[in-house]
Image (cartoon, rainbow, N blue to C red):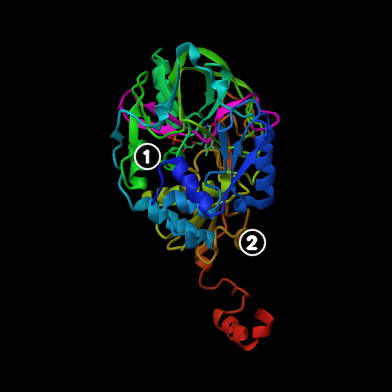
């Protein structure tokens, strides 16, 4: 059963031997550092880390890192067979199958839930009563929102969106957030602010895995994302309606902030150690979020994502989330015979994308590469897009580099694109009034006209390999 309650999910993770409780680590850089050092060593074999007894905070006020960062934890999140994880591409196919297997289910509005166990209201609101971390040594401050869900409503269509956007604490009751231009939450926020109105906002900073998945998965702006989360869970999410904003949020969330983004006040935001491994984009003025109420469960869990130079604790699942959504987009754009894609972990799940196709016509590989460079979710801060034939496993970097080195003529089979969608956190953007980047599509497919007579691959045939395995069992063990 897919768990839409974080505690029930963590109980299953613990049963699977992948939950480690760490006591005594400080909110000031230590939790982030412990997580980074462990994930750098173990990558997707590292357990989820639940920090407790954080200095200065009551026992039971906890922080969680690495919620979905292993084959087991991603399988539990999506209700996949744990056995599908042997090859990345097999697991990606299972993820995609799951994502296509359900229809959205509207949430059920309830009047009560665990989230009401504690409420700080008005002058009592104090964000620092929660163990908000400084995740990295050079962050601009304490970030309460990292593995979070920011809920907004489109003032025109009424559609509710949830997206994961970082949120920095600025005072006991104010925050700032960095939402990239073009993200759905940003479009909603800008519609209110440009009309001179405050933007109602709910920020779920102790989030369950299903809602977190909805916040991260790139969905069309037609799909109400809490409905999508209910579809994934296989039952409606129980939501309560915030009294201040009228926005819905899951009734069993761990910690929720409710308030509004000011149309007039700004404050500093950043810098923050980001997913690509840099503190890029400086500290900039962003609209102030006035937090009017904080809800939290007894012994609340603040869900966290410290991103660093890859690999880091939320990259494993990101590669699947991005790759699955890119496959959807390519299919949706009518590109035939896409056999696989992979958003590589070393490219932080964004900057190095490989698309594998069975070539059917002249120009097919160019078409696939150019479309992959622009559609969601890879259209934002992309850099390198490599197109390979279907005998290449896109998730196998050795295969990919071999194809680039033997099937691509850089002078004639690369395409440069300029003025593409970027952001101030892009390391190569220096002019914050011109948030463009460039990218390159590398066609590493055998030229279509040479498919029939390209040199034969020097690799032992499957038949001969099987034969020698049988004849020399001592060699192969
Ligand atoms: C841990 C984590 C942190 C993120 N932080 C940000 C952020 O600070 N700003 C941003 O624009 N996107 C951020 N993203 C990416 C967005 O959440 C992602 O693009 C998502 O699809 C956006 O939702 P939307 O399509 O509803 O806008 C983050 C993603 C993750 C997983």
Measuring from the top left, give residue 134's x and y in whole percent. Answer: 64, 29
What residue sits 32% from the left and 30% below the top? 159
Would you say residue 171 sits in the magenta stretch? no
Query: Is residue 279 placed above or below 69 in the rendered structure?
Result: above
What residue sits 41% from the left and 19% below the top? 199
Pick the residue in front: 369 or 267: 267
Using the rendered image of the protein, determine whether residue 441 is visible from the camera's viewpoint.
no
Question: Dot 2 surroundings within 10 Å: few (below 14), some, or many (20 or more)?
Answer: few
Going by the picture, which residue comes out furthest to the bottom?
471
Pick the residue in front: 405 or 317: 317
Give the magenta-colored segment's residue range.
135-163
Measuring from the top left, give residue 84's x and y in whole percent. Answer: 48, 61
For marks 2 and 1, give the CA distance.
Answer: 34 Å
Pick the residue in front: 389 or 153: 153
Residue receiving disc 1: 220
- Quadrant of the image containing the C terminus: bottom right
Quarter of the rendering containing residue 285: top right
What residue sits 33% from the left and 48% below the top? 234
Question: Dot 1 surroundings within 10 Å: few (below 14), some, or many (20 or more)?
Answer: few
Q: Which mark is residue 398?
A: 2
Question: Would you say 348 lies left or right of 254 here?
Answer: right
Using the rendered image of the protein, determine whether residue 15 is visible from the camera's viewpoint.
yes
- The answer to whether the residue bearing label 2 lies less than 8 angstroms from the nearest atom of ligand 1 is no
Would you say residue 149 sits in the magenta stretch? yes
Question: Would you say 109 lies left or right of 26 here?
Answer: left
Measuring from the top left, give residue 372's x and y in whole percent. Answer: 48, 48
């Amino acid at each position: 059963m897919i768990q839409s309650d974080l505690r029930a999910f963590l109980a299953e993770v613990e049963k699977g031997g992948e939950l480690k409780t760490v006591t005594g680590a400080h909110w000031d850089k230590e939790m982030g550092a412990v997580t980074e050092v462990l994930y750098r060593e173990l990558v997707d074999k590292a357990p989820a880390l639940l920090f407790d007894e954080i200095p200065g905070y009551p026992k039971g006020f906890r922080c969680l890192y690495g919620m979905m960062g292993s084959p087991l934890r991603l399988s539990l999140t999506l209700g996949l067979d744990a056995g599908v994880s042997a090859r990345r591409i097999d697991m990606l196919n299972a993820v995609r199958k799951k994502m296509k297997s359900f229809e959205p289910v509207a949430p059920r509005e309830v009047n009560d839930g665990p989230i009401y166990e504690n409420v700080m209201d008005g002058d009592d609101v104090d964000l620092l009563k929660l163990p908000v971390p400084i995740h990295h040594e050079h962050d601009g401050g304490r970030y309460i929102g990292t593995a979070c869900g920011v809920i907004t409503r489109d003032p025109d269509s009424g559609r509710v969106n949830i997206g994961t956007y970082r949120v920095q604490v600025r005072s006991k009751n104010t925050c700032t957030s960095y939402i990239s231009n073009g993200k759905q939450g940003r479009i909603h926020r800008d519609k209110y602010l440009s009309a001179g109105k405050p933007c109602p906002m709910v920020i779920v900073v102790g989030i369950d895995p299903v809602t977190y998945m909805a916040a991260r998965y790139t969905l069309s702006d037609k799909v109400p994302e809490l409905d999508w989360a209910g579809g994934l869970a296989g039952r409606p999410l129980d939501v309560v309606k915030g009294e201040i904003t009228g926005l819905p949020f899951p009734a069993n969330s761990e910690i929720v902030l409710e308030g509004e983004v000011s149309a007039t006040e700004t404050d500093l935001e950043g810098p923050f150690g980001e997913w690509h491994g840099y503190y890029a984009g400086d500290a900039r003025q962003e609209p102030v979020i006035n937090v009017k109420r904080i809800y939290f469960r007894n012994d609340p869990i603040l869900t966290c994502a410290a991103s660093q130079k890859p690999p880091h604790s939320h990259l494993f699942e990101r590669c699947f989330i991005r790759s699955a959504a890119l496959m959807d987009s390519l299919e949706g754009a009518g590109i035939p015979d896409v056999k696989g894609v992979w958003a590589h972990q070393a490219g932080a799940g964004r900057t190095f994308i490989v698309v594998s196709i069975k070539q059917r016509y002249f120009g097919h590989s160019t078409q696939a590469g150019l479309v992959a460079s622009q559609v969601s979710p890879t259209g934002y801060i992309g850099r390198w897009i490599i197109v390979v034939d279907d005998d290449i496993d896109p998730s196998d970097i050795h295969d990919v580099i071999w194809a680039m080195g033997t099937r691509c003529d850089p002078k004639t089979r690369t395409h440069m694109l300029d003025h593409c969608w970027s952001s101030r956190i892009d390391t190569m953007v220096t002019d914050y009034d011109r948030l463009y980047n460039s990218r390159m599509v590398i066609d590493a497919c055998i030229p279509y006209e040479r498919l029939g007579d390209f040199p034969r691959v020097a690799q032992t045939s499957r038949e001969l390999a099987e034969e020698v395995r049988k004849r020399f069992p001592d060699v192969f063990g």
